[in-house]
Amino acid sequence: AQSVTQPDIHITVSEGASLELRCNYSYGATPYLFWYVQSPGQGLQLLLKYFSGDTLVQGIKGFEAEFKRSQSSFNLRKPSVHWSDAAEYFCAVGEKTSYDKVIFGPGTSLSVIP
Amino acid sequence: EPEVTQTPSHQVTQMGQEVILRCVPISNHLYFYWYRQILGQKVEFLVSFYNNEISEKSEIFDDQFSVERPDGSNFTLKIRSTKLEDSAMYFCASSPDLSPLHFGNGTRLTVT
């Protein structure tokens, strides 16, 4: 069965510093991969997605993610974090054969200090 | 930009009561989903719906749950007899293709 792990429960970075949030998945074939962000009390907003093609994916709000098949990873990065980036970040994987269902990772909570 | 809207934002109910959570997906979307997030836990898939029928459901989605698209615009999740453990944030999502892209802001269900 497919699964998603996010090793870091909570990360704190300084404003202006770079950010990398880790995501690893377990799936036999090439999955669809997503990153979502959830601000407090808000819904889930799609940051970016990977279906195929270029393994470096650009998203909204200056985020990018890189699919590395050999490491089963899809890490999220941002070169310079803003205070408004403080939120919960979820990595998710969808099955390619039955991609009605998307499985979410446990989330990483990001705090940004001035 | 079109949004998925969910009502109410917060629902409090007593154990054993029936609740209906409502969602208005984006108008040209064809695929509809319900997910839930128990406080402090991960977002869990409940059910997907396409062409007026359930296309996939998780083991969480047992007989006490049902979904309906009664009038071509609303998409509802009904819980027949709520339990304490049903307390969670319930997210509706819709998509024009086969992956959920647009989520609503959720309905927080509190069962007392």
Image (cartoon, coloured by chain):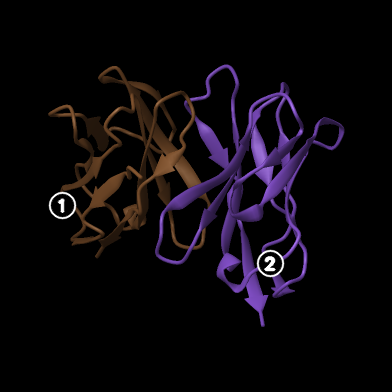
Chain colours: A purple, B brown
Q: Residue at x 60, y 42 (%)?
A: A48
**Left/right of residue A72 with respect to residue B89 in the rendered view:** right
As helix, strand or loop, the secondary structure at mark 1 comes to loop
Q: In the shown orientation, is residue B92 left or right of residue A107?
A: left
Circle 2 Cα neighbour tier, 10 Å, few/some/many (<14 / 14–19 / ≥20): many
Quadrant where the C terminus of chain A sits is bottom right
Residue denoted by label 1: B17
In the picture of the structure, the residue carrying the numbered disc 2 is: A81
Q: Residue at x 40, y 26 (%)?
A: B96
Residue drawn at (40%, 45%) of the image: B103
In the picture shown, does residue A99 fall above or below A107? above
Question: In the picture, residue B74 is in which quadrant?
Answer: top left
**Element marked by disc 2:** loop
Q: Nearer the viewer, mark 1 or mark 2?
A: 2
Pick whichever, A43 or B89, lies toward us. A43
Chain letter of the residue beneath label 2 in the structure image: A
In this rendering, is residue A82 above or below B88?
Answer: below
Q: Position of residue A35 (x, y in %)?
A: 60, 45
Q: Amino acid at mark 2?
A: Val
Residue flagged by tag 1: what amino acid is it? Gln
Quarter occupied by residue B9: bottom left
**In the image, residue B112 lies at what x, y percent?**
24, 65
Looking at the image, residue A54 lies above or below residue A110: above
